[in-house]
């Protein structure tokens, strides 16, 4: 057994950032392109762009700086605000996951599931 958890941050009861948006920002940082990052996550560009715009509106500052395409190609990069938010979220999540793991081990460390000791036969019994 092992614990699973997801953490997100809200501001004034509105979603600010969580695991999926973090994945998008990490992909933009790595790939230098919102379009490529969205494609990697299986999102439409429009959806990804909308999520980034919602985040920027809540922060009251841009999280991406984009340049138009053309012969040299366009791209996107995280702004200082976007990079700081991403790094702070990553630190927050890493610390919490470790705390969850430690707490889980304290509570469930010596707990054994009955069916983990021997496999159960899930077939219906035959009646004679």
Image (tube, rainbow, N blue to C red):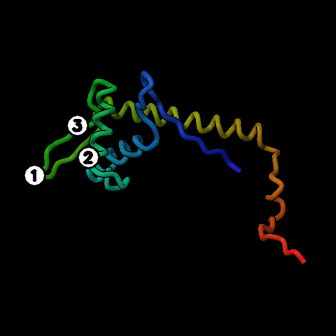
| Gap between marks 1 and 2 measured at Cα | 20 Å
Q: Which residue is mark 2?
A: 46
Which residue is label 1 attached to?
A: 70
Residue furthest to the front: 128
Residue 7: where, in percent of width, then height?
A: 52, 36
* Crowd rating for badge 1 (residues with CA inside 10 Å; few <14, some 14–19, many 20+): few
The foreground one among 120 and 73 is: 120
Mark 2: secondary structure: helix
- Between the C-alphas of marks 2 and 3, the distance is 16 Å
- Residue 107, relative to residue 32: is it above or below? above
Q: Residue at x 51, y 32 (%)?
A: 92
Q: Mark 3 and mark 2 in contact (Cβ < 8 Å)?
A: no
Q: Residue at x 28, y 33 (%)?
A: 79
Q: Mark 2 or 3, which is nearer the eye?
A: 2
SS at mark 3? strand
The span from disc 1 to disc 3 (Cα, nearest Å) is: 16 Å
44 over 104 or under it: above or below: below
Kindly give the residue lying farthest to the top in the view shown: 12
List x then y, in percent, for residue 34: 27, 47
Identify which residue is drawn at 33% across, 44% down: 29
Judged left or right of residue 67, residue 27 is right
The picture quadrant where one finds residue 108 is top right
Q: Which residue is mark 3?
A: 65
Q: Are marks 1 and 2 in contact (CB under 8 Å)?
A: no
Q: Nearer the viewer, mark 1 or mark 2?
A: 2
Q: Which mark is residue 17?
A: none
Residue 55: image quadrant is top left
Mark 3 surroundings within 10 Å by alpha-carbon count, few (fewer than 14), some (14 through 19), many (20 or more): few
């Amino acid at each position: 057994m092992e614990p699973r958890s997801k953490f997100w941050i809200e501001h004034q009861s509105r979603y600010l950032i969580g695991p999926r948006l973090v994945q998008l920002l990490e992909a933009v940082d790595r790939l230098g392109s919102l379009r490529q990052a969205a494609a990697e996550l299986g999102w439409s560009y429009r959806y990804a762009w909308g999520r980034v715009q919602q985040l920027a509106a809540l922060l009251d500052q841009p999280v991406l700086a984009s340049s138009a395409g053309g012969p040299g190609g366009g791209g996107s990069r995280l702004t200082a605000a976007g990079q700081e938010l991403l790094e702070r979220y990553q630190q927050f999540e890493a610390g919490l996951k470790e705390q969850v793991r430690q707490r889980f081990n304290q509570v469930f460390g010596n707990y054994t599931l009955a069916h983990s000791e021997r496999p159960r036969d899930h077939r219906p019994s035959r009646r004679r």
